[in-house]
Image: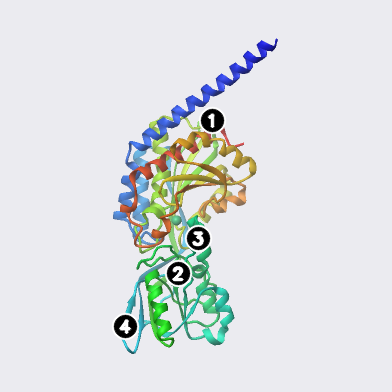
């Protein structure tokens, strides 16, 4: 009896090991395909070279969507269509910042407007500058000191954060809330130190939140910020001229792009994967987030080439407007709610295409556990963690409908050198890292679809 039980246990164990081996062999096939094809890389090159600066409302944003639509049509997916919605749009034609000094010639600083900064008058805004390191410091100075001045937020990036997304989180309030706060105290314009860990002349733009009163707001490069700060130590009364030529239009038509393979067993259960195609006006947006677009789009190609019989519907959504108003993600969630669709899971990639590192899951404990059990299949390809964490900006609105969210994460050390700046160009993309990204995302989606996440 005892021997029979041992034998039975051994058989069960052997079957399980075999199933795992089979799956590992198939995951290798997925990676073999990803690592020997350049579709994602070629698509990204096209987006970067032929549709840079694809901010929502721009002609290039539509060219980019059209290009990816063509790609899905050529793939012969089950359906591909545009999802129309309206959103405010903003464009910036030019901006400049000069230190005006009685002793020297005007000194030009490298700058880009924050979105959606209003225009200055055509001759620019000239005023004295108040340098602060935080919103709290601004508050302490109060209206009496700040009114009529240009506020210069110059808190440096804290290099002690090992994870750069945490460093970013620690510094970004100067950009996201600084201009609004300064306007409240009567400032006439705002200059921020770019939110980046690198020391160079690249301005890094980004969005800023205004309520009622809007004032022109620009980012300057970190070396430029040091220069301005040093100048203010020498001459605290030095004036600066800020010029912005920009326009906000309250309503315009734009589109998300949707492509999918219908599920063979449970077509009504949708696994949605995607990334944002828009970029800031000053950049090719190679890592942020052209890379996410082409890696998530590559999932459908690999599914097709390997003839994967997906149980659930696998849908790619290419979101418009993550950067400025996050209107694409909101429009998509509104559609899902209205149509009463059931979303099984949503994955977003918006952390660049560097060496694969992890998947994070924003869902129940069971969801995290259910997805983390696939780690063993992905460890050989560089994924060393699957843990609870961040979902994504575009998929964020789906959380209200209790959809488990997840995010693809890569080595973050170089991401903020490039983020939202003219430095985020196609030559910063490493072919192998991008291909590994396609392989990682395809594999996790394949495993989730096949085995579920409960
Ligand atoms: Zn992004």
Q: Are marks 4 and 2 in contact (CB under 8 Å)?
A: no
* Whole-number angstrom distance, CA of label 4 to CA of label 2: 27 Å
Residue hosting label 2: 116
> Quick one: SS at disc 4?
loop
Q: Quadrant of the N terminus?
A: top right
* Whole-number angstrom distance, CA of label 3 to CA of label 2: 31 Å
Residue hosting label 4: 106
From the image, state whether disc 1 or disc 2 is nearer to you. Answer: 2
Residue 375's place in the image compared with 99, above or below, is above
Residue hosting label 3: 160
| Residue 74 falls left or right of residue 237 | left
Instruction: Say which label, 4 or 3, has the lower sequence index.
Output: 4
Q: Are marks 3 and 1 in contact (CB under 8 Å)?
A: no
From the image, state whether disc 3 or disc 2 is nearer to you. Answer: 3
Instruction: Say which label, 4 or 2, has the lower sequence index.
Output: 4
Q: Name, please, the residue furthest toward the bottom.
A: 102
Residue 359, position as x, y percentages in the image = 51, 44
> Quick one: SS at disc 2?
loop
């Amino acid at each position: 009896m005892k021997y029979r039980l041992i034998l039975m246990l051994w058989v069960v164990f052997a079957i399980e090991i075999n199933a795992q081996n089979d799956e590992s062999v198939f995951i290798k096939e997925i990676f073999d395909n990803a690592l020997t094809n350049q579709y994602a890389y070629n698509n990204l090159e096209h987006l970067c070279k032929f549709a840079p600066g694809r901010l929502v409302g721009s002609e290039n944003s539509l060219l980019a969507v059209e290009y990816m639509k063509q790609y899905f049509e050529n793939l012969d997916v089950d359906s591909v269509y545009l999802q129309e919605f309206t959103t405010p749009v903003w464009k910036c034609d030019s901006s400049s910042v000069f230190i005006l000094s009685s002793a020297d010639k005007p000194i030009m600083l490298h700058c880009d407007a924050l979105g959606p900064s209003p225009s200055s008058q055509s001759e620019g805004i000239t005023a004295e500058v108040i340098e602060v390191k935080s919103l709290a410091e601004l508050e302490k100075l109060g209206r009496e000191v700040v009114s009529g001045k240009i506020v210069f937020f110059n808190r440096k990036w804290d290099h002690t954060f090992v994870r750069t997304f945490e460093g970013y989180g620690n510094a970004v309030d100067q950009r996201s809330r600084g201009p609004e706060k300064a306007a409240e105290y009567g400032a006439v314009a705002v200059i921020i130190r770019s939110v980046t860990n690198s020391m160079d002349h690249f301005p890094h733009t980004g969005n800023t939140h205004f309520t009622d009163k809007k004032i022109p707001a620009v980012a300057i490069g970190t070396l430029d910020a040091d220069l301005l700060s040093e100048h203010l130590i020498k001459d605290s009364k030095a004036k600066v001229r800020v010029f912005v030529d920009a326009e906000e239009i309250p309503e315009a038509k734009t589109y998300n792009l949707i492509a999918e393979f219908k599920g063979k067993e449970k077509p009504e259960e949708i696994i949605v994967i995607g990334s944002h195609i828009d970029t800031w006006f000053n950049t090719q947006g190679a890592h942020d987030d052209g890379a996410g677009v082409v890696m998530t789009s590559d999932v459908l190609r690999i599914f097709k080439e390997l003839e994967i019989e997906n149980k659930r519907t696998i849908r790619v959504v290419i979101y418009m407007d993550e950067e400025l108003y996050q209107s694409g993600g909101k429009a998509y969630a509104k559609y899902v709610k209205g149509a009463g669709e059931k979303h099984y899971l949503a994955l977003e990639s918006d952390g660049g295409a560097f060496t694969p590192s992890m998947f994070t899951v924003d869902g129940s404990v069971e969801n995290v556990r259910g997805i983390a059990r696939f780690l063993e299949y992905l460890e050989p390809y560089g994924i060393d963690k699957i843990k609870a964490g961040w979902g994504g900006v575009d998929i964020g609105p789906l959380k209200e409908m209790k959809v488990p969210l997840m995010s693809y994460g890569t080595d973050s050390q170089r991401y903020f050198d490039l983020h939202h700046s003219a430095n985020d160009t196609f030559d910063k993309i490493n072919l192998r890292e991008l291909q590994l990204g396609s392989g990682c995302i395809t594999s996790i989606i394949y495993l989730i679809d096949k085995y579920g996440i409960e």
